[in-house]
Amino acid sequence: MKKILILIAYFTVHLTIGQTQIIHRNAEIQQMVSEISAESLEGYVRALAAFRTRHTLSKNDPKEGILASQNYVLDHFKSFEAASGGRLTSELDIFTIPADGRRIPSDSQLGNVMATLKGTDPNDDRIFIISAHIDSRALDIMNTEIDAPGANDDGSGVAAIIELTKIMSKKAFQATIVFVVVSGEEQGLKGAEYLAKKAKSENWNLVAMLNNDMIGNSNSSQTNINDNTRVRIFSEGVPAVETEQMTAIRRYTNAENDSKSRQLARFIKETGERYVDQLEVKLVYRNDRFLRGGDHTPFAKEGFTAIRVCEMNENYYHQHENVRVEDGIQYGDLPEFVDFEYMRKITGINLASLAVLAAAPSEPQSVGIDVRKLSNTSTLRWDAPKTGKAKGYYVLMRETDSSMWEKKFYTEENTLTIPYSKDNFFFGVQAVGQNGHESMAVFPQPITR
Ligand SMILES: [Zn+2]
């Protein structure tokens, strides 16, 4: 316990001390965030909507339908390869989905457009995925002919992916980032399911998956709320898959609000709000919305850490609707209803979060909290991260009824004892790199012997 530094607000910390918020931005990440252009995003959304329909089962045509739109995305990815110094590679990953008697009437070939930005450290096998879905739909999910512009759902997410790939592929990150535009979302999360199973069977060290689905609507139907200053992150509390042992430990430590996906959501809130002004990240404590699904869910079901980024307010006149005017109301998912400035900000929180994660060391390993005896202090221990070098660690602390971490204790040791009772707080530990970038937080397991 020689030189334990207990510093609040060290490096790139963003937290509230009394009334003062300290925001320290890394210049390179700030620069990347500032490159995100609402105009570029608008251009992509309008181009995507102009394919008339991007229904998963739409016909092959050079000017309309899903394949033409996938080629549009792939051409953009390809055009970014040169500036990446050979680190960015892109492809259309084609696979066969069997008929399911529901939304896939016969065996069908689907494709995910992928751009992989290889990490710079050959010993770092971490992968981060950011995704959106290219397919669109109208009211009748099986109608492959009708206009389905899908400007917001999910043209907005796809546009963000293109913009992120353009900006981030010019930079070097320690870990690998995969930018994915999946298909088959509306037909039952088919493209994401295929990719999640592939990641599982090929044993990818997939650390986090960020799904962006509908990030451009800022006006609600019925309640008529106009707000482009808040965005939702959906994350599961209790993991979709748990072993018996995981369940037992979750119950023992009361960790139902500390799943890995919830830690990722907290990480995005802190990091996103650090780098993007005028955007509040709202954590929603559920995996997704009622009657709706998303591409993060197949990943969660394979045991991966995955969240959904989604606009704060939805407009049901412009979702899954046929383009038409009825009783003076324009229905349909048209570009004129997308708020591109809102999209710019949401793209920014994605960029900042991915950049910090991919540039930070991996998480500390074997993080534990000593529960062997009664005490009014708390002792945590951990091992160094598997990849990347940690300069130090943050021990994070919050009241049990608080959503976000409230105090950060910095140390360069692998253990820390603090004069707060383990019974009254929740804790986490982050690794901090030489560059000041933090890993996601790890919730400690009980040390019982
Ligand atoms: Zn969608």
Image: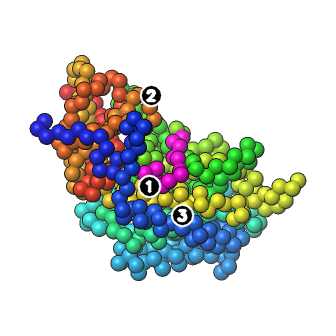
Q: Quadrant of residue 47?
A: bottom right
Residue matched to label 1: 275
Question: Which residue is painted at 13% across and 36% down in the image?
Answer: 1
Q: Nearer the viewer, residue 4 or 161?
A: 4
Secondary structure of the residue carrying numbered label 2: loop
**Tag 1: amino acid:** Tyr
> Which circle's residue, 3 or 2, is located before the other in the chain?
3
Secondary structure of the residue carrying numbered label 3: helix
Residue matched to label 2: 401
Residue 343 forms part of the magenta stretch: no
Does ligand 1 reach within 8 Å of label 3's beta carbon?
no
Between the residue at mark 3 and the residue at mark 1, the CA separation in whole angstroms equals 17 Å
In this view, 8 is above or below 47: above
Image coords of residue 397 (percent x, y): 34, 34
Residue matched to label 3: 160
Question: Which residue is painted at 62% across and 57% down in the image?
Answer: 216
Image coords of residue 315 (percent x, y): 71, 51
Q: Nearer the viewer, residue 415 or 144?
A: 415
Image coords of residue 44 (percent x, y): 60, 70
Secondary structure of the residue carrying numbered label 1: helix
**Tag 3: amino acid:** Ala
In this view, 28 is above or below 14: below
Image coords of residue 359 (percent x, y): 32, 59
Question: Which residue is painted at 28% across and 46% down in the image?
Answer: 10
Between the residue at mark 3 and the residue at mark 2, the CA separation in whole angstroms equals 34 Å
On the rendered structure, is 77 left or right of 47?
A: left
In this view, 187 is above or below 259: below
On the rendered structure, is 170 left or right of 234?
A: left
For the C terminus, the quadrant is top left
Please provide the residue range marked out in magenta. Answer: 272-284
